[in-house]
Image (tube, grey):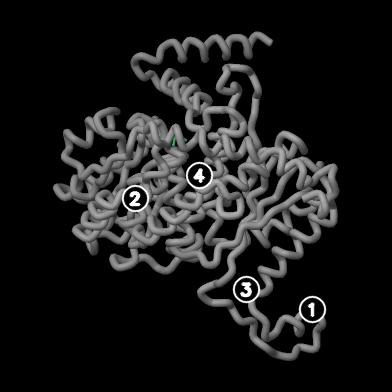
Amino acid sequence: MAPMVGAEHGLTAAEIAKARPAAEAALQGFRKSVETGEYGFPHLPFQTKLIKDILAYASSVKGTYDTVCLVGIGGSALGAWALDCALRGPHPVQGTHSAKLPRLVILDNVDPSFILGALASMNPKKTLAVVAAKSGSTAETVSAFLIVKDWLEKGAGKSAKKRIVCVTSEGKGDLKVLATGEGYRTFHLPDNVGGRFSVLSAIGLVPAALIGLDIRGLAKGAAEMTGASWKPDLDVNLALNGALHHHLMLTLRQKTIQVAFPYSNRLWGTAFWFRQLWAESLGKARNRKGELIYAGQTPVAALGSTDQHSQVQLYMEGPNDKVYTFWGVNKYADSGRIPKGKTGLAAFDYLGGQTLAKLIRAEQVATAAALTANSRPNNTLTLDRVDAAHVGAFLQLMEFQTAFMGELMDINAFDQEGVELGKKFTFGLMGRKGFEKYADDFAAYERKRASL
Ligand code: PA5
């Protein structure tokens, strides 16, 4: 706010008050779209039957695998990564995997060394594959899945089909056709839930349940946040309040970059999930009236305190074009006591007997204070603890905030034409039938490039 960072970079109370009616209109506008069934993510925490079915499936296969191999990309991978990292533990220091504590391996790229390295690290007789794609046709997912399917069939024989579970749209897409033909256990996500808003649908919940995470707790926290996100009171509705502030920061103070700055390795996956949510939802060429606006706020993920030693020099002294959102944690399962002991060295002895939790908190608030002193606007969200209920609430908070931000920007936050075009060029280049036009367009681009 202006009293902390000055009016050139901070918002004034008068600006916030003036924008309140727009925030109320954003709430009503989004509520209407949800009521008409256009957008469905707010309903996901209340899908009790789905949650029951997923848990029943997870318990029926429990003990038959030590690794869950998720084949998916974008919204079909990042949610599961966020949940795994937050609730099973940060990478690469998760507990050893076993049939009792399965790990999650996410194949979300088609770098051959990555896919082949992943296969080499897994045992087909102890692996359960989840293939997840809303469209059922994403080239990376389909090709990685064909490799995993073949690997399972060769390595696990007849039981391979039982080692594959599919998450896709109901009644459309080639993955659905394949899954039905092969008899794979299949879960669906609703048509009105976009990929990056699907973490609390079967897309995120199936892998989460299979590695033993508390998906009921996730839904409980998300349901509570959903209730708060429909309230008009900005003190209760964190999502609307956040969207309002970020919209003003973007439009009145030209803060075109938002740094998501978790001070928790457990929330590092969530920062990458958020990066997709904010970028793909808000980066749009046109507004709803069809006017060219080239809007968006570029999300950056930085890890505290690690990136203090990598990024903060730029944040402190570089262009003042960013707003910083610190994600803090109140209580850690173990505060990490630093052993006492006298070394006689000034850099060592003051730390003895204190805790890592205290130190990381000090690093966080010190960085916020330093940025503030340099007129860099920032805000802080604190999770009381990183457990299923708080993570579920946090994910739902970010999704509502994104939806409200889209309303305030008067854009469609739920489409992704830019992503779709790239997919079509890839289909053309890889020879998919029906996409010859994109192969021709690409050839024309190559000719032009070569002629210069
Ligand atoms: O948010 C989105 O819709 C996209 O980022 C998709 O999640 C991504 O392209 C993957 O799509 P699919 O699930 O169809 O493979």
Q: On the picture, is 279 further left or further right than 131?
A: right
Asked if the residue at tag 2 contacts the one at tag 1, i.e. Cβ–Cβ closer than 8 Å, the answer is no
Q: Amino acid at mark 1?
A: Ala
Q: Quadrant of residue 144?
A: top left
Q: Residue at x 19, y 58 (%)?
A: 60
Q: On the picture, is 320 further left or further right than 380?
A: right
Q: Amino acid at mark 4?
A: Glu
Marks 3 and 4, the one that precedes in the sequence: 3
Label for residue 357?
Answer: 3
Mark 3 residue crowding within 10 angstroms, few (<14) / some (14–19) / many (20+): many
Label for residue 399?
Answer: 4
Label for residue 46?
Answer: 2
Q: On the picture, is 93 further left or further right than 318?
A: left
Above or below: residue 399 compared with residue 369? above
Q: Which residue is mark 1?
A: 347
For the residues carrying marks 2 and 3, which lies nearer the camera in this image? 2
For the residues carrying marks 1 and 2, which lies nearer the camera in this image? 2
Marks 1 and 2, the one that precedes in the sequence: 2
Q: Residue at x 37, y 44 (%)?
A: 43
Q: On the picture, is 58 further left or further right than 111?
A: left
Q: Amino acid at mark 3?
A: Ala
For the residues carrying marks 3 and 4, which lies nearer the camera in this image? 4
Q: Amino acid at mark 2?
A: Phe
Above or below: residue 42 compared with residue 347? above
The residues bearing labels 1 and 2 have C-alpha atoms spaced at a distance of: 52 Å
Marks 3 and 1, the one that precedes in the sequence: 1
Mark 4 residue crowding within 10 angstroms, few (<14) / some (14–19) / many (20+): many
Asked if the residue at tag 4 contacts the one at tag 1, i.e. Cβ–Cβ closer than 8 Å, the answer is no
